[in-house]
Image: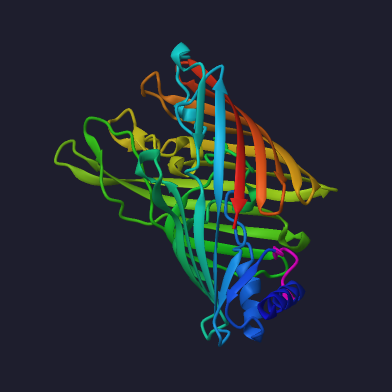
Amino acid sequence: MKKTVLSFALLGAVAAVAQPTDSIPDRAVIVSGDASHPDHIANVAMMYKHINQAFEDPAAPRFLFLDKKGAVALGIGGYVKAVGEYDFCGAIDNNSFVTNEIPVPFDPSQRQRFGATAAHSSIFLKLVTRQTSVGRIIVYVQTNFTGDNGGYGLKLKQAYVSVGHVTLGKMRSTFADGPAMAPTVDDQGPSGQTSAKNMSVQYASPSYGGFSYAVSAELPSADYTTGSETREINQRFPDIPAYVQYGWSGGDSHVRLSGILRQLSYRDESGSGANRFATGWGVQLSAVSGIAGGLKIFGHYTYGKGIASYINDLEGIGYDLVPDCAGKLKAPGSSGWTAGLQYDFSPKFFVSASYSRAQLYNSDGMADDTYRYGQYVVANAFYNILGDLRVGAEYVHGTRKNIDGSGGHANRLEAMVQYSF
């Protein structure tokens, strides 16, 4: 009884000091520790603070361990997510709806498909310390079960340490705007969305009257289409993304302008041979904002050269650098954009719809079956039945077009049951 009273007292105190954007679930359980220590109030408030969080990220942890001195709070949480899906009038042989994998031309043998997965279930640990001379220290580790070539092997998604305003580790790229991403049952997300996670060292400023900024150096993930006399080599320079942002409504709304600079290395084996570099760059404008009542808009527009690895539909298929007419490699142009609406009928129930497109430019001289663009249209609804238990239903339509004009399409109905802890 004493622990229960202390738990509710702690949560009440946290709610009083936390910012309006903090999510403090009533379900939090103090497993052990001195919940009455005043330093734990600030520690737990930070435990539930959302920073660059996307819809796919786990909510606040349910179970908390608190030390006796008020120095450290440790949260354990995650969710179990089971998804069933049915493809019709065109199918994708993947539990994630990746539009660049749509068969072109249409394949009658892949007209329909039934699938299911629990691989995107997630477990995380979050540790928060009291304020120190160098700032508050936060340690975060998140995994899911999409390892082993799409099986159920454990896979690291994020792992970082924050000291004050500096963060080091694997995390969502500074070039990606988590809160402006579309909510989907599908874990791949829209074709044009930027959602890369990289090893990074980042500085994120505090807010100055609603204005903030961040800059980072990130380990590049590069993938090329090479010619007969070129090949990939190790990268020599980090990617440098940065953003400036203005937020309002307690942080629930913002507009962000992002940029990225890349220096991509490759080997030119013509003549005597040489290591060469191609410069990549990108810009992105993203936003999420309430309009009226429960209606809000979200989305982004991204354009650049040599940034295919940052766009969902172009990642991993060799489009950061492609051959040019002189036998060297060039950074082709690419774009991605998403626009969507969400309406909250209540804190437990919302619906959303969005359209997204990814496109590759400067593909002259490449094979006829080279990707030109992909489109992703999604409509869904989510309902929290019993707080931690969420159900969702979704329809996704995707198309792929190649540079020779050929194309294919696919449709998917899917439903999920997710329990967070």
Which residue is pictured at 59% across the width and 30% down the height?
A: 376
User: Residue 151 falls in which quadrant of the image?
Assistant: top left
Relative to 15, does residue 111 appear above or below in the rendering? above
Snapshot colouring: rainbow
Q: In this view, does 210 lie to the left or right of 202?
A: right
- Relative image position of residue 302 (x, y in whole percent): 57, 42
Which residue is pictured at 76% across the width and 45% down the height?
A: 349
| Residue 20 falls inside the magenta stretch | yes
Relative to 156, does residue 332 appear above or below in the rendering? above
Which quadrant, please, contains the N terminus? bottom right
Which quadrant, please, contains the C terminus? bottom right
User: Residue 219 falls in which quadrant of the image?
Assistant: bottom left
Residues in magenta, as a range: 17-26
Q: How many marks?
A: 0
The one nearer the camera, 365 or 148, is 148
The one nearer the camera, 38 or 152, is 152
Which residue is outermost to the top?
108
The one nearer the camera, 182 or 359, is 182
Which residue is outermost to the right?
293
- Relative image position of residue 286 (x, y in whole percent): 64, 48
State whether residue 54 appears in this view. Answer: no
- Relative image position of residue 128 (x, y in whole percent): 55, 74
Q: Magenta residues: mostly which secondary structure?
A: loop
Which residue is pictured at 62% across the width and 47% down the height?
A: 285
Which residue is outermost to the front?
1
